[in-house]
Amino acid sequence: MSPIRNPEAIDTLGGHCENYDLVLVPGWKNSGTEHWQTLWEEKTPLFSRITMSRWDQRDIYLWIDAINRHLASCDKPAILIGHSLGALASACVIAEDHPEIAGGMFVAPADPMRFEAEDIIPHGRLPQPSVLVAGHDDKLISIERTEQLAQSWGSDFVDLGTAGHINAESGFGRWPYGLNILVDLVEQIEAAAG
């Protein structure tokens, strides 16, 4: 398998990794071998990933606990990069104003009702910079709902158009453009801190 085709973004992120831990937070059932999260982790040394023993459970609290366990091992402030249920759980942890979190990238968050998480997710502005990335034809959430979440959380919103659930099944394997979105977020975090 060839490397991710975005060396400029990888170089830029590599420079920022002196200041941040880039933490991947997969969704329900984990991200498979062809998923962009897995490929980012395998093809670059920049990313770490939360671990859980039961990826098949639909309990958002398991994801929240796994993120908090991972944060305890981070040496630098973390930027959470969550997909689907992992995006919802990442927003929950960021909402707690955790001192070890610098920001979050929420990709194709699932509708909270699918995971009985409507009362758990944040309903106000997040304390750290974030970006929410979504497509118009995601079967797990409407574009209107993702726009509502982005507005509520104060997240920048990136509309990918026809993009499905932004996973391997939707054709998002290596997803080099996603690295550009992450670079923009990191630079926003740097600007806010500086």
Image: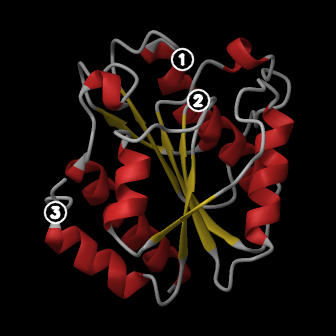
Which image quarter: residue 159?
Answer: top left
Which residue position is annotated with label 3?
6
How crowded pointer 3 is (Cα within 10 Å; few <14, some 14-19, many 20+) is rated as some
Is 25 located above or below residue 194 in the figure? above
Q: Which residue is mark 1?
A: 145
**In the image, what residue occupies the spot 24% across and 23% down?**
161
Distance between the alpha carbons at the discs numbered 1 and 2: 6 Å
Quarter of the figure with residue 59? top right
- Crowdedness near tag 2: few (<14), some (14–19) or many (≥20) residues, C-alpha within 10 Å: many
The residue drawn where x is 85% and y is 50% is: 65
Can I make out residue 97 in this image? no
* Location of residue 190 with respect to 84 vertically, above or below: below
What colouring method underlies this structural image? Answer: secondary structure
Mark yes or no: residue 55 visible: yes
Three-letter residue code for mark 2: Leu
Q: Residue at x 45, y 82 (%)?
A: 17
Observer-nearest of 169 and 135 = 169
Q: Secondary structure at mark 3?
A: loop
**Are the residues tagged 1 and 2 within 8 Å (C-beta)?**
yes
Where is residue 167 drawn, in percent x and y? 37, 31
Q: Helix or strand or loop: what does disc 1 sit on?
A: helix
Q: Nearer the viewer, mark 2 or mark 3?
A: 3
Q: Which mark is residue 149?
A: 2
Residue 116 image offset from top left, x and y in percent: 81, 16
Q: CA distance from mark 2 to mark 3?
A: 29 Å
Amino acid carrying label 1: it is Arg
